[in-house]
Image (cartoon, rainbow, N blue to C red):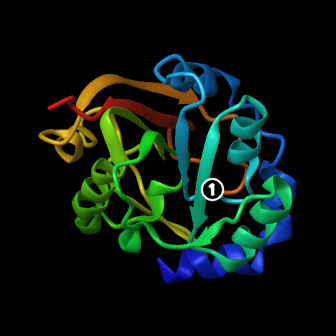
């Protein structure tokens, strides 16, 4: 995790330039379809603030955090929010959110730490709240020179959500964004799950 944080701190401007205009409209639409009007969204691992800015423009209430100090600086400028410097492992929110959005941010959490992180996300959601996440497609660790990616596929993601969430949908999409470290199959694994009402 430290390697990845260092990467984003050292490459913040480059990462901003590469990702700020990414088209996530299809994923946004799926997410919004399961949210109430004016929902409170937690943008977990918000990066440079691209998605938080979009959510604000659509009239949603947004809380955002990232583990990289430089990413937080960019996100604050992009959104005007008081973006928190925080890791997934240290998050401790009350159940106030209608939705948690974790776009390409969970993939740098080791598999052995993922169950506790998913539990923290569950605790942050209101009953019936939804959780969207995405991983590079695969079932094992992908090492690069500067970052590590813990990939997921349709089968490997299920044990992590079982018992915590009800599955709404798990799907793949072609990777049109990763120019530096695409998955071997050049796909993303997306999931949308829901915290049970009781």
Q: In front: 83, or 8? A: 83
Crowd rating for badge 1 (residues with CA inside 10 Å; few <14, some 14–19, many 20+): many
Q: How many marks?
A: 1
In the picture of the structure, the residue carrying the numbered disc 1 is 46
Q: Is residue 159 left or right of residue 31?
A: left
Q: Is residue 166 left or right of residue 131?
A: left
- Give coordinates of residue 156: x percent, y percent: 25, 42
- Give coordinates of residue 109: x percent, y percent: 40, 65
Locate the C terminus by quadrant.
top left
In this view, 17 is above or below 28? below
Q: At x 39% / y 33%, what residue is drawn?
A: 130
Q: At x 86% / y 68%, what residue is drawn?
A: 13
Q: In front: 10, or 120? A: 120
- Give coordinates of residue 92: x percent, y percent: 36, 67
Quarter occupied by residue 21: top right
In this view, 67 is above or below 34? below
Extreme-top residue of the structure: 33
Q: At x 35% / y 52%, what residue is drawn?
A: 124
In this view, 39 is above or below 30? below
Q: Is residue 40 left or right of residue 113?
A: right
């Amino acid at each position: 995790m430290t390697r990845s944080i260092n990467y984003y701190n050292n490459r913040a401007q480059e990462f901003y330039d590469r990702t700020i205009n990414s088209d996530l409209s299809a994923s946004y639409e799926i997410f919004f379809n399961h949210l109430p009007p004016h929902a409170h969204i937690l943008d977990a691992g918000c990066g440079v603030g691209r998605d938080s800015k979009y959510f604000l423009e659509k009239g949603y209430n947004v809380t955002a955090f990232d583990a990289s100090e430089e990413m937080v600086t960019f996100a604050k400028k992009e959104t005007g929010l008081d973006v928190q410097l925080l890791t997934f492992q240290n998050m401790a929110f009350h159940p106030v959110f209608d939705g948690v959005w974790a776009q390409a941010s969970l993939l740098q959490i080791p598999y052995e730490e993922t169950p506790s992180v998913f539990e923290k996300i569950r605790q942050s959601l209101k009953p019936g709240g939804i959780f969207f996440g995405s991983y590079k497609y695969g079932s094992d660790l992908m090492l690069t020179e500067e970052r590590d990616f813990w990939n997921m596929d349709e089968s490997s993601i299920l044990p992590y959500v079982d018992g915590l969430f009800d599955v709404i949908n798990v799907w793949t999409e072609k990777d049109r964004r990763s120019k530096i470290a695409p998955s071997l199959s050049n796909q993303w694994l997306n999931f949308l799950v829901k915290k049970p009402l009781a």
